Each structure stands twice: as C-alpha cells, then as structure tokens.
Image (cartoon, helix red, strand yellow):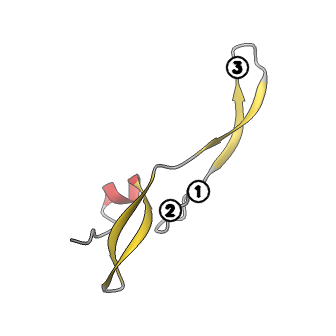
Amino acid sequence: MAKCDICGKGVGFGCKVSHSHRRSNRAWKPNVRRVKAVVGGSNQTVHVCSSCLRSGKVTRAI
C-alpha cells in the first residue's frame, strides 16, 4: 500500500532513462508510514506520508 490516507498522494509512474537513453518503466512511491493518529476523536492506525506528518495535518495518538 503506497497511498496516503490524508492527502491521497499515491504512486507516480514514468520511465527510467539510462545513460545510453534506453527506457524502462519505473515507479515513484511516496514515503508512507503507519502511524497511530487521532481520527474523529478515536485512535486509529492510518497510512500517512511524511509530508503530512511534518506539516502537522495529523495529530499523533499517545
């Protein structure tokens, strides 16, 4: 699972290009962590990307 439950950031697809310019498919995955957070007044385990954690969009459960 590589999708943030808060912002919806997911996997991006593109081409890996070598020095000789040969192309092959690749994926850019977001930095997703499983954290315990307060959602709707109760503690839940959610998948959150690191940018949402840093920006304070998630309140961590104690």
User: On screen, 14 above or below 45?
Assistant: above
The residue indicated by pointer 3 is 18
Could you tell me the amino acid type at mark 1? Answer: Gly
| Label 2: element kind | loop
* Mark 2 nearby-residue class (10 Å; few <14, some 14–19, many ≥20): many
Residue 11 position, x and y percent, is: 61, 52
Q: Are marks 2 and 1 in contact (CB under 8 Å)?
A: yes
In the shown orientation, is residue 22 left or right of residue 33?
right
The circle drawn on residue 54 is none
Could you tell me the amino acid type at mark 2? Answer: Cys
The circle drawn on residue 10 is 1
The circle drawn on residue 4 is 2
* Mark 3 nearby-residue class (10 Å; few <14, some 14–19, many ≥20): few
User: On screen, 33 above or below 22?
Assistant: below
Could you tell me the amino acid type at mark 3? Answer: Ser
In the shown orientation, is residue 58 left or right of residue 18?
left
Pointer 1 or 3: first along the chain:
1
